[in-house]
Image: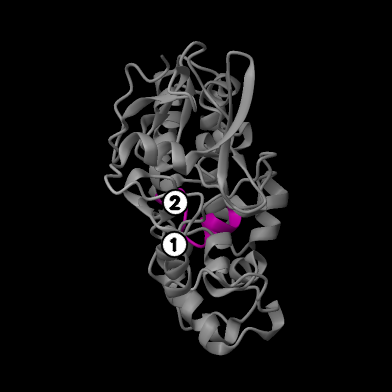
Amino acid sequence: MIFIGFDYKNEDIKWKKIYWLNGEETKYSIANIGLVRNDERNRLLKNLTRKDGYISATLTHHGKQREFFVHRLVATAFIPNPENKPEVNHINGIKSCNYDYNLEWVTASENIRHAYDTGLNKGSNRIRTGRAPEHIIRSICELLESGTDLSFVQIGEKFGVGRNLVSGIYHRESQQKISKDYDFSKYEIKTDFSKSGDLSEKTIYPDALIHLVCQMIDSGNYSLPEIAEKTAVNYQTVRNVYYGTCRHSISSQYNFSKTDKNPLMEDRKRKIIEACELFDRGYNTKEVAVRLELPRSLVRNLYSGNTWVEIAKDYEFYKTKDQRKKHHK
């Protein structure tokens, strides 16, 4: 299986067999972090994000195909249910977070009460971007300043606002009069994916899966497309992890971003150094991105001190980043 030889960091991944409705053992296994694996093909299944926000996987057994909720597969395999409660609740309210420690068996009334207690029953009561009250904006700023693990989408859901507003606050493109009082340097942008693999809605790849991607890259035995195929992680995500443009807090722990083994990475490092030099000479992010043909998001995160810190820390623009944020209008 593809997991042999890889030691996971920060996560203890366990696997258990999945059983069909009649109790027969299937060819699939479920992990305690919500991954589904086809044991015969040694491949992870690509989970789907439904319109209601839940994650599902389609399994086949003796020619019959059925869609299963991943959170129920995890709960059935890893969480005791001595009282035979019928429903599974996400403790933190995030439907895509299917770790075993985030799930619990509940009754229908307990599930409804949890939704009201945690404010999850917002429904369509989303605040328009231009009408969000100041206390909501400040709450978002405080959450970003804390370095939360939530993505822009999840922060938006928490406060009943859109992803674009949260992104605009983080990038100082909106609500500057309020956001200037906060330091977002601890927050790392999380990538949200829809079932099509595009940047969109609510599913975030677990840290353990990103560790696996990094370990496979670091081994030098797999190409990026092979890693994407074997792990069911979107190819663009694998590529971005490799280049350090997303999940850098994890990828920076591995040697592939620090060695000479791959010429593509060396070219990216050379451009990062050039970008730092241009920042010190007074170029802005747009000018640097165009001049070096780098993604605007990467250049912006570099300038904000959120990525490639091991290189940027030696340059003047990085040393003055806190002062720039403090006086940003």
- How far across and down, in percent of the image, does residue 182 sit? 45, 78
Viewer-closest of 216 and 68: 68
Reading the image, the residue beneath label 1 is 111
Q: Quadrant of the C terminus?
A: bottom right
Q: Residue at x 31, y 30 (%)?
A: 14
Numbered range of the magenta stretch: 299-309
- How far across and down, in percent of the image, does residue 256 sit? 42, 29
| Magenta stretch: includes residue 13 | no
Residue 210 visible in rendering = no
Viewer-closest of 118 and 283: 118
Res 33 → quadrant: top left
Viewer-closest of 71 and 252: 71
Q: Amino acid at mark 1?
A: Asn
Residue lying at the far top in this picture: please name it: 40
Q: Residues within 10 Å of mark 2 (few under 14, many from 20)?
A: some
Compared with 185, 20 (above or below) is above
Reading the image, the residue beneath label 2 is 87
Q: Residue at x 66, y 79 (%)?
A: 127
Mark 1 element type: helix
- How far across and down, in percent of the image, does residue 12 sit? 28, 35
- How far across and down, in percent of the image, does residue 19 sit? 44, 24
Q: Amino acid at mark 2?
A: Glu
Viewer-closest of 191 and 272: 191
On the picture, is 17 further left or further right than 192?
A: left
Upstream in the sequence, badge 2 or badge 1? 2
Residue 45 visible in rendering = yes
On the picture, is 159 further left or further right than 14?
A: right
Compared with 288, 60 (above or below) is above
2 and 1 marks in contact (CB < 8 Å):
yes
